[in-house]
Image (cartoon, helix red, strand yellow):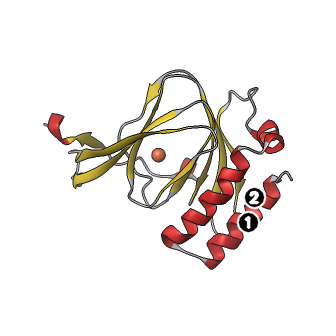
Amino acid sequence: MSISLEQLSDQCREILSEKSGADALESVRQVLEKVLVDDAFVAAHIGPQETAGRKVLFEDPDLGFTICAHARGNKAESPPHDHGNSWAIYGQVAGETQMTDWRKLSAPEGDKPGTVKAVRTYTLKPGMAKYYNVGDLHSPSRSLPTRLIRIEGRNMDNAPQRDRYVVAETAS
Ligand SMILES: [Fe+2]
């Protein structure tokens, strides 16, 4: 049975009201994985016709969590980052995301970026969702267009500029 955007947001609200921390994120992640392979949901919100970049589908007025559709074009690579005081769950609908997790070696100080060391690299394939808790450093890259549904702890459109991190071996 297909899930609607309203049902998805209701389920997220229920989980995030009852649970916290990694336990809550794992539960939301499991819900999101079902949505990623829901043909009707995908067709309505993040089908192949979508090219608009980032689109906010829902923002909870009380808890602040935000459900977004991300349609991205050709090859791109993001630097290591976290999402400030928010968590994020990346859900792959189409295409593949190469993701690297990073360990923080030093924090950013003023204009000086923090330094990081790679922990592991893996591929997010269609139907897979992965959560990044507050402070979890990661860097996505893609070589072909992708479509994702992303759930954020709070709307990243309103977030301050991200902290900068560089790979320790090349840090100056
Ligand atoms: Fe991210």
Q: Quadrant of residue 45?
A: top right
Q: Is residue 145 above or below residue 13?
A: above
- On screen, residue 134 versus residue 24, left or right, reads left
- On screen, residue 65 versus residue 106, left or right, reads right
Q: Position of residue 9 (x, y in %)?
A: 74, 60
Q: Position of residue 131 (x, y in %)?
A: 51, 55
Mark 2 highlights which residue? 8
Q: Quadrant of residue 155?
A: bottom right
- The kind of secondary structure element at disc 1 is helix
Query: For the point 77% across and 45% down, which residue is it?
Result: 38
Q: In the image, which disc is placed on residue 107?
A: none
Res 66 visible:
yes
Query: For the point 59% across and 25% down, which residue is it?
Result: 145
From the viewer's side, name the closer residue of 6 and 110. 6
Q: Is residue 89 above or below residue 55?
A: below
Query: For the point 43% across and 61% down, which residue is it?
Result: 134
Query: Tag 1: Cα neighbours inside 10 Å, few (<14), some, or many (≥20)?
Result: some
From the viewer's side, name the closer residue of 8 and 111. 8
Q: Is residue 13 above or below residue 35?
A: below
Marks 1/2 in contact by CB < 8 Å: the verdict is yes
- The amino acid pointed to by label 1 is Gln
- On screen, residue 130 versus residue 16, left or right, reads left
Query: Tag 2: Cα neighbours inside 10 Å, few (<14), some, or many (≥20)?
Result: some
Mark 1 highlights which residue? 11
Pick out the residue farthest to the right: 1
Q: CA distance from mark 1 to mark 2?
A: 5 Å
Query: For the point 49% across and 59% down, which residue is it?
Result: 86
- The amino acid pointed to by label 2 is Leu
Quadrant in which the C terminus is drawn: top left
Pick out the residue farthest to the bottom: 18
Q: Position of residue 39 (x, y in %)?
A: 80, 40
